């Protein structure tokens, strides 16, 4: 039986008088690939930040992997992010003066202890076995995003969040990254939530939800 | 009020001991409290009985020996712990600690309580007499209450700070040494540094003797000046420091060198690393207690080097000899020689000089000695807490033994006591000073 890894009830987030996310009820089964679509300012990133424990909701309930994020302390939330979530950003956010290998090992360091051999294997898995010692500035956008993926999956997260991960990539690199994510999901069985503008990218998921003005307006099965 | 202030650090140390025991024996709190409170009271009573029945020196000597034995035990345990992790087939991860027996918990508590109580009572009665019952009763009640408070407060210490058997012993012994360091009679660091200094001194002499070398004559003076550095108090101090801290350092090293647990059976890399990180963190937390013990030992050394004791050290009074070559000092003039205090004099004659002192011992006999011993540099003596102390090597000389020759005792000088005066032969005292003191100061930095 598949259990729900994410369960939100009336989840809201307001910034002063602006309601960035209106009450949202959402269930995400374990292992699902959910694509979140919407225009700029529709609340996609707000939702992602809440699901990743990067931000706290203004109201409602938020259960992730059986843990109530509303009740967690700052330390508890940090532990949760460390052990439960992997995040891929559009802008990569790699440390520019560290090599690809060191960027991945840094994620290990904050999780537990660094393990160079394991970090090498992760980079080899994303096809960067020969670029271990290169700094982000020496890598292409697609390669940087693959380092980002290796960094996100190195701690075996149960939930992988992607905030426009292919926003900066061309069509060919987008395809490579999405193919890689698909392979990794089938290997490691994690849940993916991907925020995107791009319908083609969203179609890689199992289900698509569309947000508009902070509210869930449409839900559909993905097209691939 | 002053007594309460004097005992404050000792009682805090006692609280620390009880808290450490409570952390190590969490399941035996009630029994621990009973053992700690009763043994502390027992230690007070026992110490007071020793002080009442025997002279102060014997009582404090017994307590000091017991604390010294605890320190030796710490050495043995530290070496064993270090060997366990570095010896063949070193230990990987400490196994699940067995629930300690009630007898072990109460035994450890009793021993620590007895010693802490005895140290407190010795501190309260530095002149060597027994303590009256009322202060003793108040101290007993305070010690028992403090034990209860410490057991309660221990619950608020972060749970991460765990205590192993070795670090528990290190903390208890360091707190006992810390408590002892507040009393000149119980302090162990100064005698230890003196012993190290004397050991090196004797070793060099024995070496020369075994090589059939006439040591003082064989080398030139400047060579001896270099060898003399070995006999200096700083070598004794650093040597003692090494002996003092080594067991705790060994315990820290033993914890630090513990091998990581085997994680090969865990498939997922993140889980493997998480387990290793948890072990490393737990190992780091286990270092907290021995590191704290090291800090306490450091404070004990500071106390020993800079004791908060006001020494009675009068400025030497210049004296001259009469026509018959004698120095005559009246018993009762401006200075009362029989007031039990140290009185110092300086005699100068034709470019030579001698510093000497007159003291009335507790049994009422007057003694005349040089203000120097036959071993150390002639830094002189001060008087405090029923003893005179050699400023150079910090050895305490009980007042009863002043006037007797040997060791670090001030060198006795022949004298005559009349009904109202003390007379000393001037040439004898000058020669005695030359024979002993000039030789000891011949070498830069120290002893003969």
Image (cartoon, rainbow, N blue to C red):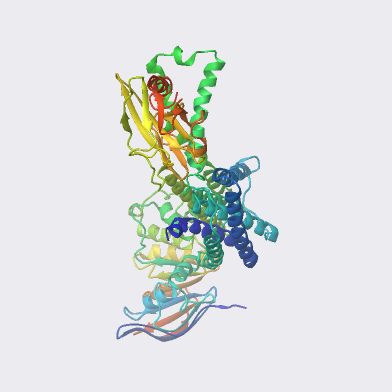
Q: Which residue is drawn at 50% across and 64% down?
A: B158
Q: In which quarter of the image is residue B335?
A: top left
- Taking A57 as reference, is B181 above or below it? above
Q: Position of residue B293 (x, y in %)?
A: 50, 51
Percent coordinates x, y for residue B310 in the rendering = 38, 46
In the rendered view, does B15 fall on the left or right side of A197? right
Residue A68: image location, x then y, percent: 50, 78
Is residue B13 or residue B394 the one in the foreground? Answer: B394
**Horizontal arrangement in the rendering, residue B48 relative to residue B328 (left or right):** right
Residue B87 appears anywhere in the view:
yes
Which residue is nearer to you in this view: B27 or B317?
B317
From the viewer's perspective, is residue B105 above or below residue B258? below
> In the rendered image of this protein, does residue B83 appear above or below residue B414?
below
The quadrant in which the C terminus of chain B is found is top left
Nearest the eye: B442 or B193: B442
Closest to the observer: B287 or A81?
B287
Q: Can residue B398 be seen here?
A: no
The quarter in which the N terminus of chain B is drawn is bottom left
Q: How many labels does the image show?
A: 0
Q: Position of residue B205 (x, y in %)?
A: 51, 21
């Amino acid at each position: 039986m598949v259990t729900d890894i994410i369960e939100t009830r009336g989840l809201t987030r307001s910034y002063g008088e602006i309601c960035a996310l209106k009450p949202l009820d959402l269930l995400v089964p374990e292992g699902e690939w959910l694509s979140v679509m919407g225009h700029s300012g529709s609340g996609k990133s707000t939702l992602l930040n809440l699901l990743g424990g990067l931000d706290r909701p203004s109201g409602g309930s938020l259960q992730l992997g059986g843990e109530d994020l509303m009740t967690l302390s700052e330390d508890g939330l940090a532990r949760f992010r460390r052990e439960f979530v992997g995040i891929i950003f559009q802008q990569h956010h790699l440390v520019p003066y560290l090599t690809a290998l060191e960027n991945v090992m840094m994620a290990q360091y904050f999780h537990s202890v660094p393990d160079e051999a394991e970090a090498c294997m992760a980079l080899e898995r994303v096809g960067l076995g020969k670029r271990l010692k290169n700094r982000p500035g020496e890598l292409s956008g697609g390669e940087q995003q693959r380092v980002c993926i290796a960094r996100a999956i190195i701690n075996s997260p149960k939930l992988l969040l992607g905030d426009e991960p292919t926003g900066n990539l061309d069509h060919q690199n987008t395809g490579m990254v999405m193919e890689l994510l698909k392979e990794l999901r089938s290997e490691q069985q994690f849940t993916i939530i991907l925020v995107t503008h791009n319908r083609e990218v969203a179609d890689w998921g199992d289900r698509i939800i569309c947000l508009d003005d902070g509210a869930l307006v449409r839900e559909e099965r993905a097209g691939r | 009020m002053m007594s309460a202030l004097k005992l404050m650090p000792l009682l805090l140390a006692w609280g620390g001991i009880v808290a450490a025991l409570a952390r190590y024996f969490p399941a035996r709190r009630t029994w621990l409290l009973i053992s700690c409170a009763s043994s502390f009271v027992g230690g007070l009573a026992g110490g007071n009985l020793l002080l009442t029945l025997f002279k102060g020196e014997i009582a404090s000597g017994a307590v000091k020996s017991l604390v010294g034995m605890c320190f030796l035990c710490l050495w043995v345990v530290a070496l064993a712990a270090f060997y366990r992790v570095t010896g063949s087939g070193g230990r990987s991860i400490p196994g699940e600690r067995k629930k300690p027996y009630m007898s072990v918990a109460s035994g450890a508590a009793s021993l620590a309580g007895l010693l802490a109580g005895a140290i407190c009572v010795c501190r309260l009665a530095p002149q060597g007499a027994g303590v009256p019952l009322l202060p003793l009763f108040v101290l007993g009640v305070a010690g028992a209450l403090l034990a209860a408070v410490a057991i309660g407060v221990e619950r608020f210490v972060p749970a991460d700070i765990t205590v192993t058997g070795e670090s528990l012993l290190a903390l208890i012994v360091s707190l006992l040494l810390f408590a002892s360091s507040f009393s000149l009679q119980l302090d162990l660091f100064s005698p230890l540094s003196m012993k190290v200094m004397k050991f090196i001194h004797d070793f060099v002499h024995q070496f020369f003797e075994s090589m059939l070398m006439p040591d003082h004559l064989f080398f030139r003076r400047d060579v001896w000046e270099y060898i003399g550095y070995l006999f200096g108090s700083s070598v004794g101090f650093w040597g003692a420091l090494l002996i003092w801290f080594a067991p705790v350092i060994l315990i820290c090293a033993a914890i630090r060198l513990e091998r990581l647990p085997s994680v090969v059976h865990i498939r997922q890399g993140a889980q493997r690393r998480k387990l290793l990180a948890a072990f490393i963190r737990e190992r780091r937390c286990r270092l907290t207690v021995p590191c704290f013990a090291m800090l306490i030992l450091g404070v004990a050394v500071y106390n020993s080097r800079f004791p908060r004791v006001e020494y009675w050290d009068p400025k030497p009074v210049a004296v001259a000899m009469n026509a018959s070559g004698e120095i005559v000092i009246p018993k009762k003039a401006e200075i009362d020689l029989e007031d039990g205090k140290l009185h110092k004099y300086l005699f100068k004659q034709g470019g030579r000089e001698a510093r000497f002192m007159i003291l009335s011992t507790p049994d009422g006999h007057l003694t005349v000695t040089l203000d120097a011993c036959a071993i150390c540099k002639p830094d002189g003596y001060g008087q405090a807490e029923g003893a005179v102390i050699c400023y150079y090597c910090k050895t305490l000389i009980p007042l009863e033994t002043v006037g007797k020759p040997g060791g670090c005792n001030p060198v006795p000088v022949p004298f005559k006591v009349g009904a109202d005066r003390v007379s000393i032969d001037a040439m004898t005292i000058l020669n005695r000073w030359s024979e002993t003191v000039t030789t000891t100061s011949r070498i830069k930095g120290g002893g003969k």
